[in-house]
Image (tube, rainbow, N blue to C red):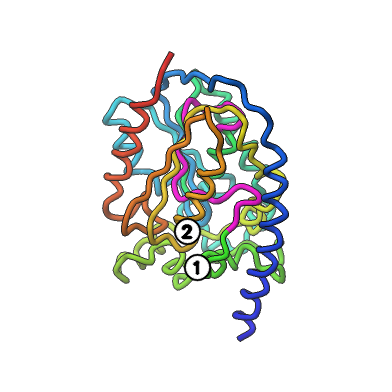
Amino acid sequence: MPAVRALVAVAIFSGFLSAFWSGCAHTQRSTAPKEAPRVMSSKTVVFVHGMFVTPTCWKAWEAHFQARGFRTLAPAWPEHELPAATQRDQHPNARLAALTLDDLLTHYRKILATLDEKPILVGHSMGGLIVQLLLQEGLGTVGVAIDSAPPKGVLSLKYSFLKSNWPAINPFASAKKPIFLDEAAFRYAFVNTLPPDVQHQFWVDEVVPESRRVGKGPTTKTAQIDFAHLRPPLLMIAGEHDHIIPASLNQKNAGLYQPPSVTDFKLFAGRDHFIIAEPGWQEVADFVLDWIGKQPTP
């Protein structure tokens, strides 16, 4: 019962914040210029992973894109370089606990600055929000945000969203200790459509502790998006049965962007949050490749 009361309280509080933040976002909608930025062709793809996992979640995608002539990079977040089991053994990691969304953006800006061409950006979950923010800065030729964490002011009151995100948004939990996502929580939030044995193996292979500060990043000024700002094309993808980032939240996020910037939305039926790694990932990857190929070049 205390957990239920806490979730209800979060829902009421989130409703107030949603109304307030949405109003703030609306005030940013300045008059847009008549033409969107031109897209420069690129053969470099940077994959951005999300919370609770390592870059190994992109291993199959990297091979898939490389087979089609792309150069790929999937950099680890700071404190996410070691194998998943090793990171779990190191819990609690004070350096991980200190990690913020600001730190991650700085990390990726430095990586992108070393490249010899502006890349295609593909991100999942919190990585999807990072892609949206980097694309807003003009640091990619196109962006793909899959099951993306929402920008500041874009919220959902769905029970699955509140339950799945409770470990990160719990106001009573200390930010000095990272979140340890147990197997039951991972099954519900990430892989709710899969058989139990597959869910278990994903937890063993992929899941790592995570910074609570990163989890709260979407509520901070760092995650602010100017939806009228001109930027390169963006594709947003959602899984129909995603618990932690409901498809309706992704669609709401996509719908806030204003023309003439290109913003496309694709819903994959029957899929959950770990759409990039679970069986059927090739369909999603091929859709992304096809969409990238259709974007205009100078």
Mark pair 2, 1: CA separation: 8 Å
Whether residue 182 appears in magenta in the rendering, the answer is no
User: Which residue of the protein is positioned furthest toward the top in this rendering?
Assistant: 298
Query: Is most of the magenta stretch helix, strand or loop?
Result: loop
Q: Which one is nearer the viewer's eye here, 229 or 29?
A: 29
Magenta region? 135-155
Where residue 282 sits: x, y (%)? 27, 44
Which of the 4 image quadrants contains residue 5?
bottom right
Residue 216 spot, x, y in % from top left = 65, 56
Asked whether, in this view, residue 176 is left or right of residue 111, the answer is right
Q: Position of residue 140 (x, y in %)?
A: 51, 27
Please report the residue visible at 51 percent of the width from the left and 54 percent of the height from the top: 249
* Helix, strand or loop under label 2: loop
Label 2, on which residue? 246
Going by the numbered disc 1, the residue's amino acid type is: Ser
Q: Residue at x 42, y 30 (%)?
A: 45
Q: Quadrant of the C terminus?
A: top left
Q: Are marks 2 and 1 in contact (CB under 8 Å)?
A: yes
Asked where in the image residue 129 lies, by quadrant, the reply is top right
Q: Which mark is residue 160?
A: 1
| Amino acid carrying mark 2 in the image | Pro
Disc 1 is placed on an element classified as helix
Category of crowding for the residue at label 1, using alpha-carbon neighbours closer than 10 angstroms: few (below 14), some (14–19), many (at least 20): some
Q: Is residue 208 above or below residue 24?
A: below
Seen at 65% across and 49% down, the residue is 152
Sequence-first tag of 2 and 1: 1
